[in-house]
Image (cartoon, grey):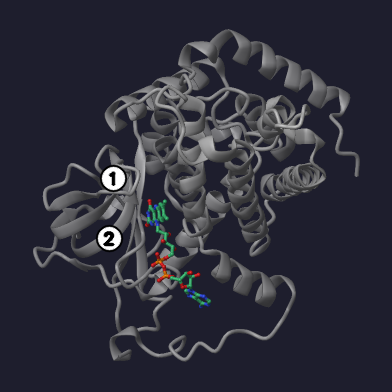
Amino acid sequence: MDFNDSPQEAAFRNEARTWLAEHAPAHVIAPGSKMTDVEESKRGRAWMRELFLGGWSGLTFPKALGGRGLSGSEAVIFSEEEGKYNLPKGPFTSIGTGMALPVIAKHGNDEQRAQFIEATLKGDITWCQLFSEPAAGSDLAALRTKAVRADDGSGDWIINGQKVWSSWAHLTDWGILVVRTDPSVPKHKGLTFFIVDMKTPGIETRPIRQISGASEFNETFLTDVRIPDANRIGAEGEGWACCMTVLMGERLGSGAHRSGVEPILDLAEQTPDGHGGTMIDDRSIRQQLAEALAEEQAERFFQARLRTMVSKGENPGALAGMIKLAYASRYQKTNGLALELRGLSGIAPDADDTQTADAQYHYIYSTVMRIAGGADEVLRNQIAERVLGMPGEVRMDKDIPFEQLK
Ligand SMILES: Cc1cc2nc3c(=O)[nH]c(=O)nc-3n(C[C@H](O)[C@H](O)[C@H](O)COP(=O)(O)OP(=O)(O)OC[C@H]3O[C@@H](n4cnc5c(N)ncnc54)[C@H](O)[C@@H]3O)c2cc1C
């Protein structure tokens, strides 16, 4: 397989580069700039609108659904070029495009597609993910939030329970939600998938204060939340299949959009080593950088392969976890190296050293990537079992009705 751009891909890259050079700079977040989360999400919506107007949204989405119907490689090329700019992107944009839209496109109906796809691509609707619960994270199918039909014959659902770690739920418009609708069957079988307007009465988001001072995620309480059956995605009891579509989108979305290594290479070349040379002269630093670059390239090619599988209608299954697993540990390693190169100022930067302050933020943040979207250990289990065919974990609760589990 030739991983260099084909003539068509090179032309596409050029087209993307030219468009981005004209439109991205106005949206770039300057290094060290402090924004409120309200401001950040507003700027995220503006960038999404710009992408939509320029025809750069939903690149791999079928044309019939408002996308461009391009290949996985073209999507990777665009992400790489876009990743050269520090743009306002985050869960407030990616949960919509990377998780809500794939599930609506695949499991939703025509009305839902018409209502949500274009509006999300344009940034008019943003999304949060209401999956995790205090006792259901890695073991998502153990979730307890429940929905029952209203007893007035309307077909509406009444939802009660608690979600947690709901990123940006306090500022997004809609949520993708998985709940238990049938506790009398084994845990994976009694789940149903919904979308919910976050302004529905009975939804309360309580921001969680993080070590960084920010509050990007929330506890979300649902008390007698009434939603119409029209908000159901897929059939009753098919929630797990919908979750798999969402998690696939989340894992494929991780990876080498933005080079983590090149800026650190530049830093190593510019940072004096105290002996008349620069840090790049240090053999151990060079080896760490070479290793990180090799990993980054491997991720990039692997991601192109997986996206191509998806665009051909194939299911990468547990392979998608490999990209997330590799990316998360490389991201953490390279951010650690960025601080190490700065020596003592990496620990205690001057007040006006915004670049080091940014590097510190990324280092602290990099630890969460090893948990969010599937923890390292859990992804390794899945790869061992489903890719390598090793013996499965013992799962005593798999076939027992949920209501009988202790
Ligand atoms: C920054 C961030 C943003 C998030 N955003 C969202 C969001 O928007 N919406 C949402 O629904 N969720 C969100 N999450 C939650 C995330 O999906 C969960 O944190 C994750 O699935 C792990 O679940 P947990 O925190 O309950 O940990 P647990 O499942 O309790 O795991 C704790 C530890 O035990 C290990 N472990 C668990 N089971 C096994 C096993 N079988 N074998 C070996 N080791 C195991 C795990 O690897 C981990 O190290 C977010 C998390 C983070 C960090």
With respect to residue 401, does 308 lie above or below?
A: above
Q: Earlier in the sequence, mark 2 or mark 1?
A: 2
Q: Quadrant of the N terminus?
A: top right
Instruction: Return the x and y of residue 385 as percentages of the image width and height.
Output: 66, 77
Q: Does any atom of ligand 1 lie closer than 8 Å to the CB of label 2?
A: yes
Instruction: Give the left or right position of residue 78, taking residue 188 as reference.
Output: right
Name the residue: 43% across, 50% down. 108
Name the residue: 23% across, 44% down. 198
**Mark 1: which amino acid?**
Ala
Circle 2 sits on which residue? 163
Q: Does any atom of ligand 1 lie closer than 8 Å to the CB of label 1?
A: yes
Separation (CA) of disc 2 from disc 1: 10 Å
Q: Are marks 2 and 1 in contact (CB under 8 Å)?
A: yes
Circle 1 sits on which residue? 169
Instruction: Return the x and y of residue 14 as percentages of the image width and height.
Output: 75, 16
Q: Residue furthest front?
A: 275
With respect to residue 28, does 185 lie above or below?
A: below
**Foreground residue among 380 and 52:** 380
Name the residue: 56% across, 70% down. 377
Q: Circle 2 — which element? A: strand
Q: Circle 1 — which element? A: loop
